[in-house]
Each structure stands twice: as structure tokens, then as C-alpha cells.
Image (cartoon, rainbow, N blue to C red):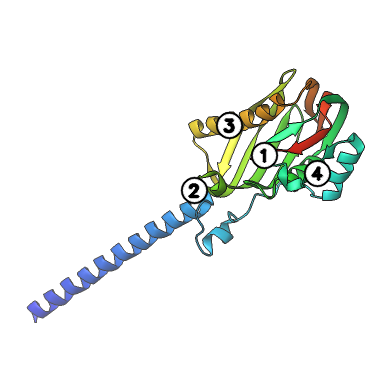
Amino acid sequence: MFSFNFKLRNNKDAIAGIQAIAVIGAVIIIGLLTVVAASGMIHVPVLTSLLGTDEARDLGVEIDYALFDEMLEDQGIVLNDEISDFTLTSEILYSDAAPMDLSLTSSQLSSYLQATNNEGPLKDIQVKLGTDNQAEMAAYVDLADLGYDFKGPVYASGTFEKASDSSINIEIDDAKVGLLPLPGGTAEQAEEELENLINDHLAKMPGLQIDELEVVDGNLNFEGDFPTTFDSVEE
């Protein structure tokens, strides 16, 4: 009887140990899947959707493409090709600059960026303008067409201001991929890449003159000389 009880107790202990290991293993797997889903870079069924990382963060900015059309008409800006040909990564030929005094709301700027970029690597862009040159940006990034295995929602907040008569400066205070913060070095690299991307476009604008560029009370104010005709260049 003692031997039977001893073996039974040992079997129960072994089963309990196996169950404990299984539970720990399940917790670890769920934890890893949650981290992966939280990044938004890899789709994990159910979890990705529950965490809201299968789409760009909503900053509460109203998108209305009619605002984009009105802005072009008000400023006399002409796009000579399809709107989808004017993404942030497109090669664009700009006309000579002309005087322009422009004030854009978050809705106008975001509507412009979505109208021109939703066919490119940055989709569903929202920019929420603050004050003292502060702004937030959210988008869904898909870099497959650029040769990188990366896609997911990104978010950044920081400052956007004039650096010279023909360039801007960006400083990112907070950056996330999905729900996970970007490491400092990666955030700095993203800041540099975004700044270079915009300044590369500005450098190709003949006669560009930035007299004033500031974010105040939810508006982006520009005064100076800016091109009024854009043509896309086939690569």
C-alpha cells in the first residue's frame, strides 16, 4: 500500500509539474505573441485587431478631400498628373516659385497628405498641429515596394520648424511602432530620414524662399515663395 501511494503521489507530482510547465509555456507564448502583435509589424489573428495595431492611430483629425481641392484652387497650385503620382517618395519636377501666404489646418494638411500618399508607402497619414511648432503624426507604413520587410502603424510627436530659407528642421520627442516605443537610436534615425526626405524635395524647388514657417494654434503658417506647378517624373 505504501509503495502504491508513493507511486501515485509521484505520478500526481509529475503531472502537476507538467501542467505547471505547460501553463508557463502558454503564458510565455501569449506574451511573445502580444509583443509581436503590439508592434503591428506582423499580423497575429485576433490579437492584432484587439490591440488596434492593424491600422494607423486615429488622431481625431477630420479627412475631407474637398479641402484638398479647395486648397489647390485657393493657392493656384496645379498638379499636372494623377494625384497618386505625388507621394513623399515620388520624383517631382517643380515650377519656379511664386509668392505665397498660406495657413493650413490639421484637416487641410492631413487631407492633402492622404490624397497624395495613400497609394504610396505612407498611408492614412494624419497630422495634428498644436502650438509652438509642436505636431503629432500617425500613419500606416508599408515598405515592401521599397525593398524592406516592414509594415505597421507608426506614431511620432515633436517639433517642425524653419531651419533656413530653404530647409526645415524636425525633432522627434516620442516615436512608436504599434504600441511599442522606438529605441532612442532608431528614433533619431527616423527623425533624420524624415527630415532628409522633406529637405530633398525642398532643395529641388527653384527659387524657394521660406520667410515664415511656424505651427501656432493648430495651424501651419507659411509665408514666402513656393512652386505653383508640379509634374511627376517617370522613373
Viewer-nearest of discs 2 and 4: 2
Q: Name the residue nearer the viewer: 78 or 211.
A: 78
Tag 3 residue: 193
Q: Earlier in the sequence, mark 3 or mark 2?
A: 2
**Residue 58 horizontal/vertical position (percent):** 69, 50
Viewer-nearest of discs 3 and 4: 3
Kind of residue sitting beneath label 3: Glu
Q: Does any portion of residue 218 appear in the rendered image? A: no
Where 168 falls versus 21 (above or below)?
above
For the residues labelled 3 and 2, the Cα–Cα distance comes to 17 Å
Tag 2 residue: 149
Q: Does any portion of residue 25 appear in the rendered image? A: yes
Give left or right: position of 18 versus 44. Answer: left
Quadrant in which the N terminus is drawn: bottom left
Kind of residue sitting beneath label 2: Asp
Tag 4 residue: 107
For the residues labelled 2 and 4, the Cα–Cα distance comes to 31 Å
Kind of residue sitting beneath label 1: Ser
Circles 1 and 2, Cβ within 8 Å, touching? The answer is no
**Residue 151 horizontal/vertical position (percent):** 55, 49
Tag 1 residue: 90
For the residues labelled 1 and 4, the Cα–Cα distance comes to 23 Å
Circles 3 and 2, Cβ within 8 Å, touching? The answer is no
Kind of residue sitting beneath label 4: Ser
Where 213 falls versus 40 (above or below)?
above
For the residues labelled 1 and 2, the Cα–Cα distance comes to 20 Å
Where 174 falls versus 143 (above or below)?
above
Disc 1 element: loop
Q: Earlier in the sequence, mark 3 or mark 4?
A: 4
Viewer-nearest of discs 1 and 2: 1
Could you classify mark 4 by the number of other residues whose Cα lies within 10 Å: few (under 14), some (14-19), or many (20 or more)? Answer: many
